Amino acid sequence: MWIGRPGALREIQDGAASFDRSPDLGVKEFAGLGGGVTTWAPPHQPRRLKVAWNSMEPADYRHLDRLARRLDGPGPVAVVDPLAGSMLGGHQGDGTGSLTAWSWSNSDIRLATGAGPGAPATVAVVNVPATLGPDLFWQHPTWAGYPVAPGMTVTWWAPGLIAAGAAIGQLRIQWMDSAGTVTGTANAATSAPLVRTVPTGVAYARPVVRFAALGTWPIGRAVCALGDVSAALVAGDGPHGEGTPAYSITAYSHAASAGDGRWRDVALELVEVTNAAG
């Protein structure tokens, strides 16, 4: 897994002794006098992480110690979870839900919510300039893009919009630095999934579809995943989005391991947040 501030992610290569990544469902039960049960669930279920390592190497535990003690300032941290099939949010990966999951380059693109619960959002392209066609961006809820680190491999796939032979548009990935400035763009010349290695100096990846045709289409399923998973995606294995949320460290333990004292037993508890002011 990778953890840190965007632009300064560190890969923790030691296998975790325990890793609980269960979301906080927040479901409440209310029992009526007649014995019936009513439940209430909040519209958002924040994920909680509980991770522990035994005999962690000095460079790794020093990195986590700085994060937990907020030595580099306030604000949330990023955790790139290797168990997440897709870095996109759940509704976002399905092409449903709030339109805040996307942004667009200009008025050449118009988005609309689905016709009913669970119905996909639609994108209408009303104009295609001769150059620099209109772009639809899959937007991270907290940061300029999805946190990544140089050397990672990223696979981007939006089969509902990039269909073989349809010539709707082109898959692209915008690379951004830690300030959110675009430093480069990767693109695919075919309708296959786009697989690229994150360049040096990049802190965020933002998935894009650049349109080349007029029309209206459902956004549909999309996957932005770590590693080269293109073969599985083409075969129809499209994992649902689990998100790459911003986290705040809420608990931290740090104890000496058995041995010569250089190693540490470390445990962290984190909760998904919309902001972390301190």
Image: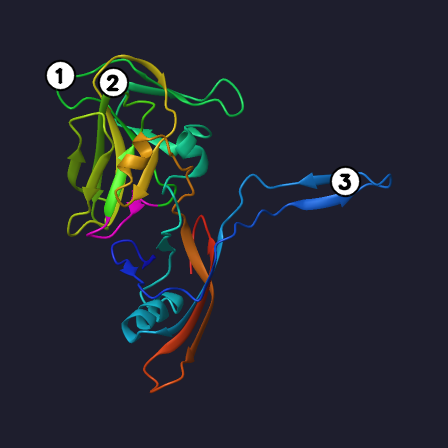
Is residue 250 left or right of 69 when viewed as pictured? right
**Crowding at mark 2 (Cα within 10 Å: few <14, some 14-19, many 20+):** many
N-terminal-most mark, 2 or 1: 1
Q: Amino acid at mark 2?
A: Ile
Quadrant (top left/top right/bottom left/bottom right) for the C terminus: bottom left
| Number of numbered discs on residues | 3
Q: Position of residue 171 (x, y in %)?
A: 23, 29
What numbered label is drawn on residue 192?
Answer: none
Helix, strand or loop for disc 2 = loop
Quadrant of the rendered image containing residue 130: top left
2 vs 1, front mark? 2
Q: Which residue is painted at 26% across and 12% down in the image? A: 214
Q: Which residues are magenta?
A: 143-152
N-terminal-most mark, 3 or 1: 3
Helix, strand or loop for disc 3 = strand
- From mark 2 to mark 1, how far is it between C-alphas? 15 Å
Q: Position of residue 166 (x, y in %)?
A: 25, 15
Q: Which residue is mark 3?
A: 37
Q: Which residue is painted at 43% across and 43% down in the image? A: 242
Prevailing secondary structure class for the magenta stretch in the rendered image:
loop
Q: Amino acid at mark 1?
A: Ala
Helix, strand or loop for disc 1 = loop
Q: Which residue is mark 2?
A: 168
Quadrant (top left/top right/bottom left/bottom right) for the N terminus: bottom left
